[in-house]
Each structure stands twice: as C-alpha cells, then as structure tokens.
Image (cartoon, rainbow, N blue to C red):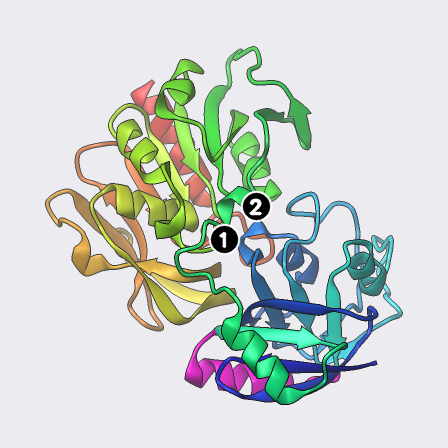
Amino acid sequence: MKALIALEDGRIFSGRSFTGRGEVYGEIVFNTSMTGYQEILTDPSYKGQIVTMTYPLIGNYGINSEDMESRRIQAEAFIVKEYQGVPSNWRSAQTLKNFLEKYNVLGVEDVDTRALTRHIRLAGAMKGVISTEDLDPASLIKKAKDSPGLVGRDMVREVTCSAPYIWEDCPVEGAAAPKGNALRVVALDYGIKFNILRCLKNSGCEVIVLPATANARDILALEPDGIFLSNGPGDPAGIPGVVETIRDLIGKKPIFGICLGHQLLGLASGGKTYKLKFGHRGGNQPVKNLLTGRVEITAQNHGFCVDVSSLDEKEVEVTHVNLNDQTLEGMRHRHYPVFSVQYHPENAPGPHDAAYLFDQFAALMKERG
C-alpha cells in the first residue's frame, strides 16, 4: 500500500509499505553498509530513528537468531529501495518482512533512497514521519515539525536493562557470579550491543551488566577489574545523573567507553557535545590512529560528537580522528587508565580493524590489577 515520507523541511518522498499499515515518527538517517541490516535494526543506538539503507537490495539473506544485537528491533522504521522477499542463505530462519511485522515496525520500499540520502547529506538529518494512513503532504509535514527530536531527550531509559544480569552468550539473571580467574567487567547498559559483550568475554572477561541508573557505590561494590561504558541512542547531554556517576568512577578503575559511552566520558571530563549535521553511520568510516599512524576502516553509528576544543589538553589526549571531517574519534586520560572511541570496534556489522581495543582494555586491567 502507498506510503508517504515527510521531512520537517517540507520534502516529500513516496513509497510502498511491505509490512502493512502504520504511522511513525523519528529522525530520518541513512546507513551506508552493504550488509548487516539485522544488526542495524536491532542496535539500540537507533532508538528514535528511521533508518534508510543506501544499498538498494535489502532482505536477500533473511533473518537469523545469531545476528541479533538486542532482544528486539530498535529502529522506528526501515526504508529501502527494493525489498527482496525470497531470501537465499542457509542461516535464514525468516524473512525480513516477517521480522518487521513481529515487532510492528513499518517497512517501506520503492523509495528513491539515492535522492533521500543526498537530501539528508546536504540538508542534514532531520525529523520525519512515515504514514500509510495520512497521505496529505501538508498534514504530514506539520506532524514532522511538531514531533519530538532527539536533542535533550533521554533515550537511554527506553533501552537500558531493567535489572542486572550476567552475560553468558545470552543474558543470565543475577547480580554477580564467582570471579574465578577471569577479569571482572561491570558494563553500564546505555543501549549495549550483544557483540560488545561477546567481545569482552572473548578477551577473558566475565561481564556483569548493570542498568544505566546504577551509581558509583553499587558499581564499585561488585569489585570490578574494569568498567565499560556502552553505546546507546540519543543526546548524551539529555541523560540525567549518568555523567556524575562516571565522574565519580574516573581514577577508581580502568574505564573503556564506546560511542555514547565515549561521549558521556567526554562530558564527565569537562568537555561538551554537539549534534553532527548528518552523523556517521555505516561500515566504511576511515579513522586515523594518532598513536600508531595507521588508518582503520570502522563501523559507526552516531549523531552527536565530543567537541575536541572543549577538552583540557593537560588532562585528555586525542588518540583518533575521523579522516572525513576531522571530528574526534578517540581519546585517553593522561593520568588515569581511561580511554574511549566514538566508533564500534565490535564490528557487528563492519570491519574488524579495531577489534584490538578489547584486548587493549584487558591488558590495561591486568596491568592495574
């Protein structure tokens, strides 16, 4: 059935729903990855966003149980050029259409995704609405303008876990486990991806995941060897209490942050964050490691960034920069065992160039143990 996509600046795109009726709001963004649509859809960092895939054919390898990055689809809706309804892959357990319908997420095809991407690329990511119910362009544009944006909103509360759990290739209820010889990591869940937890475990860590609301006293009471600050959605400045908790943890234990965790660490270090014009999303972002001089091709998904000029150079050292726009991609504290990156080294989906960071975190915990 016909669907209209309206952007807050008045631009209209037409398409066809392949998942039934609906109307949904969100910030419309694009992702440049050629594969990995299941991981993208289930990444909690996409909460509040409508994802457009730049690769034209989507759905051709279906959906499986192993590539989930959270318990459900997190994106608000999914826009593609052409949906492939007959998957061909030995791992496929269901179609993308069935997957979207299971979680009542609108999927729209027959959209000129090249034109939509180019428009966002020039004008910037913006609020939008997709509807099969209301096909009046003027009405939809007003709805897009009136819809809530991401700036200042606490999106983390919608994706964080409700109670502590132990990671054992899947969530296992409980607040603590026998430590044994493994390094104990407390991971703060701002919208954590499952593959991050897998990578931490593969680096020799036992991982206890705590809700984003956990305070420093409760975290340190678990006697961790290190603390991990996860990825997540939305504006880092809109999450109450978290920055103060991280500030209380700096200097107490080794800390590693990814994506939103990196931004929150920047705020806790006295810096500021700002919204990027169109964000970085996809599996082909070039980042230069200033410590080694090497260029890493990275997977990214963020719409906010730490303002490098707001950081105290005497306290924080820049370690990575984005080669496309020179924005901050990594930093470390000059006096404490604390470091973070803006991109996603867990590569789900994406290249494996930055997987070394998990082993680096484990080595730092052993050194400080």
From where the camera sits, is residue 113 visible?
yes
Does the residue at mark 2 contact the one at mark 1 (Cβ under 8 Å)? yes
Residue 326 is labelled as none
Residue visible at 54% across and 71% down? Answer: 29
The quarter of the picture where the C terminus appears is top left
Against 195, residue 254 (above or below) is: above
| Magenta stretch secondary structure, dominant | helix
Q: Residue furthest right?
A: 86
Residue 75, horizontal then vertical, whole percent: 63, 59
Residue visible at 50% across and 45% down? Answer: 156
> SS class of the residue under badge 2?
helix
- Residue where numbered disc 2 is placed: 158
Viewer-proximal residue among 80 and 333:
80
Viewer-proximal residue among 166 and 15:
15
Residue 178, horizontal then vertical, whole percent: 56, 10
Q: Badge 2 local density, few (<14 within 10 Å), some, or many (20+)?
A: some
- Determine if the magenta segment contains residue 113: yes
Q: Is residue 261 left or right of residue 157?
A: left
Mark 2 and mark 1 lie on one chain; the one further toward the N terminus is 2
- Determine if the magenta segment contains residue 84: no
The image quadrant that residue 366 belongs to is top left
Q: Amino acid at mark 1?
A: Pro
Residue visible at 49% across and 81% down? Answer: 120
Residue 233 is labelled as 1
The CA span between labels 2 and 1 is: 9 Å
Q: Is residue 328 left or right of residue 81?
A: left
Residue 50, horizontal then vertical, whole percent: 60, 67
Q: Badge 1 local density, few (<14 within 10 Å), some, or many (20+)?
A: many
The quarter of the picture where the N terminus appears is bottom right
The image quadrant that residue 41 belongs to is bottom right
